[in-house]
Image (cartoon, rainbow, N blue to C red):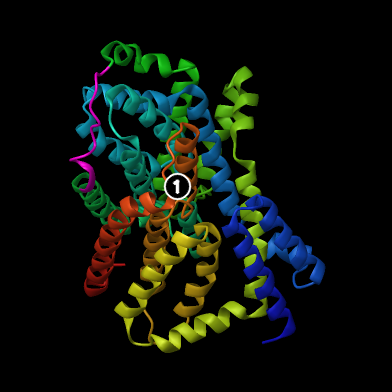
Amino acid sequence: MSISAVLAVSVFLVTYVAIGMERINRTIVSMSGAIVLLILGILSLREAVTTYIHWETVGLLFGMFTIIAVLSEAGFFSWMALWVAKMLDYNPYRIFVVFPLVTGFLSAFMDSITVMLFFATLTYELSRLLKFDAIPLVVSEVCLANVGGASTLVGDPPNVILGLMLGFSFNDFVIHNGPTAIVAGLGSVGVAYLQCRKRLVLGGAVDRQALVAMDPARAIKDARLFKLGLGAFAVAIFFLVIHAWAEQMLHVPLTAPLAPLIPAFFILILGGHKTEDILRKIDYDVLLFFIGLFVVVGGLEKTGAIKALADLIANVFRHQDLALVSTLMWFSAVSSAIIDNVPFALSMVYVIKGIAGQVGVPALAIMVWAVSLGTDIGGNGTPIGASANVVAYASMEKKGHRIGWPRWMLLAIPQTMVALIICNVGLAVKLWLKFF
């Protein structure tokens, strides 16, 4: 291995460890790693900007973040949670089953961090009024948010990276990951309900007057912005569904990043005095985090370190398709429970791309679905496995409910294992049918 490769691997490992320790802001860590590579001369600034930073991913995320910021500013998430609770007649057992399914559905199309930020808070408020234990429900909501995120291109940042960098569309993810994620989500909810149904309700008098006062309509802070946000979201999803067809059949350059960027641009124009508030809510630090990581992982790609790893994996699993696909899924799952799943997914893009170029290995597509499912769902296992976990965990601590790692893992790992086993079976069936 050359000196430049050793240096690139060293910077990568230090960046990974620093992100995992969470002592320093992860955006600062990733940008610092990128700057070190530039100073060492492993990458030039031109190479970093034009070759390794994937601007399509940044653009798609910026568009989706803008639309989600609009919905958040309008009060959409609070309204949704209160409306669902009211439809369920504030029954704790019904809420325990339906709330996770709702977070799973929303997280398939929206940022799971925002979804959990609102649902964790409202779950706590409902638990206080209905006298049930909020922690099992919040953990189940997080698990379903990550499972739901696996089902679409925009559901989870690792999917955005895998899809756009390897050429898979929104429809590809819905067709191939969607059915598996739905079954895995139902299995996860079933396990959660069996785990907690006997000790969910704590007992005590329910404050019905306070429940009546929680009118969903009052959660809407700006009715005009609410309608604009939902309209922009619907247009973005519609464009994501038809963009490949529009490019191929109509020769309209409607790329995946443009699908959310176009409605996001118009909504900022129509936002009026709310536009500045919307812009302040966009997660710019996440975009900078991605840019830094692209450069850090680009150093591994340029120096040949990733190619060496891909060659090794291909040689070990040559002509063993199911073993390779299963290993990729479970390795992704375990890794994502320990470290941030975004840098892991970015690294795996180059690894599976290198493996796919070998003789006697499965198609790139089935490896993408394996890594996607493992990375998105495996993060459920620990409180730091995914960003939604961290948000929900911190939110409950602020409310005086300390979950702790042991209880989180006791609740989350059985749900995660069932979901992953279902996904592994789904991947095996896809290989057998050659449907990938």
Q: Does the stretch in magenta take in 198?
A: yes
Q: Which residues are magenta?
A: 195-206
Q: Residue at x 50, y 63 (%)?
A: 345
Identify residue type, mark 1: Asn
Q: Residue at x 54, y 71 (%)?
A: 350
Q: Residue at x 26, y 64 (%)?
A: 421
Q: Look at the image and tell me whether residue 289 can be seen.
A: yes
The residue tagged 1 is: 389
| Image coords of residue 190 (percent x, y) | 20, 48
> Which quarter of the figure has residue 205?
top left
Q: Nearer the viewer, residue 329 or 278?
A: 329
Magenta: main secondary structure: loop
> Which quarter of the figure has residue 65?
top right
**Is 50 displayed left or right of 226 in the figure?**
right
Q: Nearer the viewer, residue 160 or 323?
A: 323
Q: Residues within 10 Å of mark 1 (few under 14, many from 20)?
A: many
Q: Is residue 203 above or below residue 402?
A: above
| Image coords of residue 356 (percent x, y) | 45, 78
Q: Is residue 52 above or below residue 181?
A: below
Q: Nearer the viewer, residue 401 or 124?
A: 401
Q: Look at the image and tell me whether residue 358 can be seen.
A: no
